[in-house]
Amino acid sequence: MSGFTTLRGVAVRSAMWGALAGAAIPNASATNFGSTGTQGAGGTNNGVWLIFDSYFVIGKRALGATADASVDAAYTSLNSTTDIIGFTQTYGSSCETAAADAAYESCFFDDNYGNNNLLGWNACFGSVTGTHPNQVCSIQFTRLNTAYSANGSLSQYNACHEMAHTVGLRHSTDSASCLMTFASGGSSSTLTAHDRAHVNAQY
Amino acid sequence: MTGFDRGKRLLIGVTSFLLAACVAASTIGSGPRAQPDEDYWNALRVPGANEVEDYGSFGDMAASADLIVRGRLGTLEVGRIIRGDAEEDVVAMTSAGVFDAQILAGTGPTDGLAVEFLAPFPATSVQGILDRANAASPSGDVLLFLRDKGGAESGIFRLVSATGLWEINEGRPRAPLAEANGLGPNHRFAGELTDVSSFDGLITLVENRL
């Protein structure tokens, strides 16, 4: 199934480039920072949130080798090029606990979640504070869907993209940024100076 | 990290209390909802999602979809549960039946057709969220551009993308799930929708793109 869906995605991307060729591209330097998460009854849902402060601790949960390396690479890049500090840790216990909530800003998971059209997504599993665009989630669950991102470069792009969302960055129209959406042609596995400036302004 | 953790716990406790107080106050004081369908759409939105498929026109979307159908969405129900390697990695899917389905293009069932959605919430919260969503089920027709998931999931339909669901809201075409990504109600399709103010008008537009 992975090959089938990836091929379909590539075909769609090609079609998208054709469609976008004559369209006006929004200014790549426009603001792409701030929380967007929505809330429903009984819990907090999906979207982009901020973290409390510059301490950013990631719990890696049963990641496959490719995703594990990609999360490490994305974190190392974030840690070395912005004011974000902290570490990643392969976590052996459930992230569904108060202890994990206190210790981690995000737990990362990977699996073949099926042909659901999403390379990855974030869910706030803890409590939220504040209001948009500065809403903070105490712990996020970040999923990397290996149905689409099994290969190395795509996995790195996906990890960078989802990790950037966990600190408050939104989608970008800059092809040099991993925050450009996949369907729009995104493939970079790094943040841009513009992205990093947003992070450093907040944390 | 010990001092930091203590501080974080204290902050969580204080802010949770304040948040609960705010929620209680807003509940007591809330009036009629401006858009009663919003709880339903909120349950299906995935802000910040990185989609594999996305489209810039009805023509492209229609050409790619496996099935294009008009109908009414039923209540959302908890569907398949996908479990990852970690014990707490539990991903719930939801599904909604499509009633009075009329197929505009493609092949698929008109009886028993259902659309599957990701429920990007903690699995333990899904039922409560769906209960609230179903109290706000949309009553009007929707236009759906669907993908047969294929492979091991063959026969299960999802939207081709967040722009694969359209309704008419206050006389204007709207793709409510696409709004989660910070897009306007008509997304990139605005140029095609200038003269569309009714659901039949929307259907005619799509039929002209087939």
Image (cartoon, coloured by chain):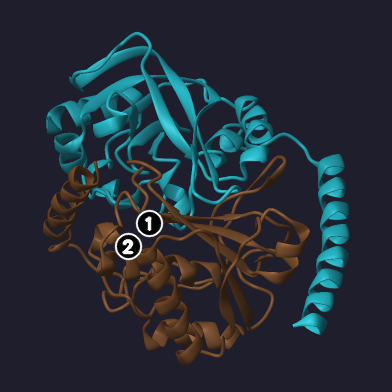
Judge from the rendering whether residue B34 lies leftward or rightward of residue B92; answer left or right: right
Which chain is assigned brown?
A
Q: How many marks?
A: 2
Which chain is assigned cyan?
B
Pointers 2 and 1 in contact (C-beta within 8 Å): yes
Residue at figure coordinates x 47%, y 91% from the top left: A80
Disc 2 target residue = A181
In which chain is the residue bearing label 2? A
In which chain is the residue bearing label 1? B
* SS at circle 1: loop
**Can you say which quadrant of the picture contains the C terminus of chain A?**
bottom right
Judge from the rendering whether residue A131 lies leftward or rightward of residue A75; answer left or right: right
Residue at figure coordinates x 29%, y 58% from the top left: A150
Q: Which mark is residue B50?
A: 1
In this view of the protein, which residue sits in the foreground, B210 or A15?
A15
User: Can residue A192 be spotted in the picture?
Assistant: yes
Residue B51 on image: x %, y %: 34, 52
